[in-house]
Amino acid sequence: MSWDRVEYDEIAACACGAGNVVRHCYEEDDDWNRSRDGVTGYDINCDKCKNCYHVDSITRYYLCPPWKGDGFVSHIYLVPNGMAIPQVMQPTYIQTYTLDAEIASMYDKAQINAVISDMNNSKYSTRVRLDDSRAIIALVYKRKRMKSLNRIIPILQDVVSRYDSYKWNPVTVAQFKADETKAIMENENKINEVIEKSFELHFCRK
């Protein structure tokens, strides 16, 4: 099995307009109808721009249906020498690997104790009154495939007894998200500062 490779160039006007920037590209296909493509390099064919700029890029991800692409969109720039476009920061997904840690990350002690009381009074999962109770029952069922309150209540009691040992709870999660949002906004400001001083390249195939 081998890959068939086609190489080609794309061209874009440079920042001053006196020259151009050439992007060297390739496309490959194999016998299994798989394909891949990429870029091997750039040439700045302008003495003035070559002394002032270098090629840099920024890639962002946008949620989209599979038939519209992979969601990644890149923009290529001539960036002033001595500057670089910061990498885009994405929000972090807080991973909790166990059921008890996930419950602790979502509810405070008072909420969990209220759910325990609701479950003790209700006896059956279909009779609970609190929205938090119903949400926890759904979470336990998703994780453990069980809805018996007699089995869920001990889990909640254990979470309460060890609550202060968990890394994530509603307070720490909210603080982490606030700090992360601030960092992302500061990073976006830095990205915009560089882009404002840069020149975007729009390539077309030769």
Image: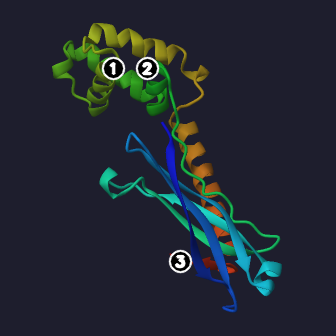
Mark with earlier residue (3, 1): 1
Location of residue 183 with respect to 193 vertically, above or below? above
Residue at (49, 31) in percent of width and height: 105
Residue 157 in view, yes or no? yes
Please state the horizontal and vertical placement of residue 74, each as a whole percent of the image. Answer: 54, 64
Q: Residue at x 51, y 31 (%)?
A: 95
Nearest to N terminus: mark 2 or mark 1: 2
Q: Where residue 148 sits: x, y (%)?
A: 25, 11
| Nearest to the observer: residue 193 or residue 124 | 193
Residue position for label 3: 206
Query: Disc 1 designates what residue?
Result: 140
The amino acid pointed to by label 2 is Leu
Q: Nearer the viewer, mark 2 or mark 3?
A: 3
Q: Amino acid at mark 1?
A: Val
Q: Which one is nearer the viewer's eye here, 117 or 77?
A: 77
Dot 2 corresponds to which residue?
A: 99
Q: Residues within 10 Å of mark 2 (few under 14, many from 20)?
A: some
The spot of residue 160 in percent (x, y) is 48, 18
Return the mark for residue 198: none
Residue at the image point whose x is 33% and y is 15% from the top: 144
Is disc 2 in contact with disc 1, using a CB cutoff of under 8 Å? yes
User: Seen in the image, is 147 located left or right of residue 84?
Assistant: left
Compared to residue 68, the image places residue 95 above or below, namely above
Q: Of the residues shown, which amino acid type is indicated by label 3? A: Lys
How far is the residue under mark 2 from the one under mark 1? 7 Å
Position of residue 41 in the picture relative to residue 140 (left or right): right
Label 2's element?
helix
